[in-house]
Image (cartoon, rainbow, N blue to C red):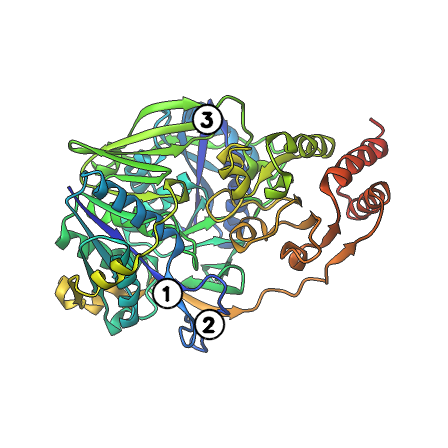
Amino acid sequence: MSNDILFFAEFSGGTPARSAIELASGAAELASQSGGAAVALCYGSGAAAGAAALGAHGATRSIVLGDEDRPAITYASAAVAASRDAGLALLAPATPNGRDLAAALVGTLDLPAFGPVRAARVVDGTVETEQATLQGRVITTARPADGAPSPSVVLVLANTFTPAEGGSGSAEVSEAPAAAESALARATVAESHEADAKVVNLEEASIIVAGGRGVGGEEGFGPLRDLAAALGGAVGASRAAADAGWIPYQLQIGQTGKVVKPALYIGAGISGAIQHRVGMQTAEHVIAINKDPDAPIGEFADLFVVGDLFQIIPALTDEIRRRKGS
Amino acid sequence: MKIVVCIKQVPATGADKRYTDDLRLDRNGVEAIINPLDEYAIEQALRLADDGRADGVTYLSMGPEQASEALRRALAMGGDDAVLITDAALAGADEWATARVLAAALDKLAPDVALMGMASDDARGSLVPGAVAAMRDVPLLSYGAELAVTDGSARVRRLSATGFDWISAPLPVVATVTDQVGEPRYASLKGIMAAKRKPMETWSLADLGLAADDLRGAALTTVTDARPPEEKPPTERIENLPAAEAAAKIADWLAQRKLI
């Protein structure tokens, strides 16, 4: 067993996902603690072409699992071959694809699993993780049991690690070792449908303006979009707004949507039910705007503005534009 | 076509939850429910049965004896029978151990579709379904907003980065569904009465051909500390101000924190 720290790097059109860049710097950080190397397991369209560039973000080596556009889970057996006895920990993004691949490793190689974690480090030669559990009521610290196999599989929330910028290094690229046949490879995309409008990846946004039932309809998101644009952020929503069809499900934040950890989250017309809260409670700063002074979101927001969002949000947009001089 | 729905009993969503001194979930005096996201898996299975696509719906759960209440509750919604796996050696089981046990039980039940919710309300790792699929060497169809089953194959409608895909695989499969499959039905009084007569078996590890040693003390992970979250400073409030003044105060607040 080596002290390397592996991580999943998903590619699309040769570009690494934001999660890949964050995990590259996270793996480099843990590798400096363990005395090993940060090793990327790259998959998705253009992964072979983009693998070396992860060196700029902290990867020492990149192993290409495959570079076709197919369901992530079908890369499971290549991931198994590349990570068998191959390191101390493997970091996976806490996204649907990241979880699917992580689970396949846990099931195939009988590995300890952690997460989704909000912090990870190497202490005394093993990985130690920190996780909010029971809907954020309890914070636990966990480690592999004595004698547990390696690598430890760690699901990592978005924005847990800050991407390393400005590096110029190039990772050494290799092919994944020969993989065993697996039934997991039998999943195929039977049909693919594009949405009418382009949707952003909320996990990559550092500022999010989210709307809920109180936004009242599709057109009610207009002022939220203006504010998000003024702040350089993205628009998100609660499940109520997505279920009502006001906004695509890709922009839903919460237990069954995206789990986000932006620097700033502004919730407008969102009551703050626990299912929404678990999707945004790790945001660094939370502002709530709600006309109900007793809305639950007021109990955990950093700043609670009681009032009509349709008056306050346009006024805030104007104020921010004025201060930014645009 | 046979479906097994795996369900987990969890503490009620709003309950006051804590860990015991030995760093396990304290179940004493805490109301327990079916994991809310598993109810969507139940609903999806029952819809397939209603449409004549499934010939049988079996529920499977691993947990302490009181988890039989969750199975009985599921049977009141519909379905045919249930299996509870309970064993003292399973206390404190982690995701890997849970997957080992469920995989062994599914080997025995041999369903065409093993269906699960997308996550559990308490731990939210979502690794059990994929680990079970890998252990049983069957395809995984995850995060379905809808599950369809036709001759010899299953497919799920899954959100993609830019829209949605239908992902397909030959049976048998492990599948998970989201809360987009449709609201779970309520148990009717008739359903509750009927559930009392539906068969429920209890299996131990030995019934699955597993020994406690196979499960390495039920966990490959160990929790070393459990504590309340860090105290946050109290919420600041802006109330009863005209919009322009409120906006200026919010902008000041953002500027102080270098967010604009």
Q: Position of residue A139 (x, y in %)?
A: 53, 64
Q: Which mark is residue A145?
A: 1
In the rendered structure, the answer to whether residue A97 lies left or right of residue A17 reads left
Q: Position of residue A266 (x, y in %)?
A: 67, 44
Q: Is residue B179 visible?
A: yes
Task: Say which amino acid is labelled 2.
Answer: Tyr
Q: Residue at x 18, y 42 (%)?
A: B54
In the rendered structure, the answer to whether residue B125 lies left or right of residue A31 reads left
Q: CA distance from mark 2 to mark 1?
A: 19 Å
Above-or-below relation of A281 to B52: below
Point out the image quarter for the C terminus of chain B.
top right
Q: CA distance from mark 2 to mark 3?
A: 42 Å
Q: Position of residue A315 (x, y in %)?
A: 80, 36
Nearest the camera: A221 or B16? A221
Task: Say which amino acid is labelled 1.
Answer: Ala
Q: Which residue is mark 2?
A: B19
Helix, strand or loop status at disc 2? loop
How crowded pointer 3 is (Cα within 10 Å; few <14, some 14-19, many 20+) is rated as some
Task: Say which amino acid is labelled 3.
Answer: Ser
Q: Chain of mark 2?
A: B
- For the residues beneath circles 2 and 3, the answer to whether they share a chain is no
Q: Residue at x 24, y 33 (%)?
A: B169
In the rendered structure, the answer to whether residue B47 lies left or right of residue B248 reads left
Point out the image quarter for the N terminus of chain B.
top left
Q: Position of residue B40 (x, y in %)?
A: 35, 48
Quadrant position of residue A175: top left
In the rendered structure, the answer to whether residue B7 lies left or right of residue A57 reads left
Q: Which residue is mark 3?
A: A12
Question: Sequence order check: which comes first, mark 1 or mark 3?
Answer: 3
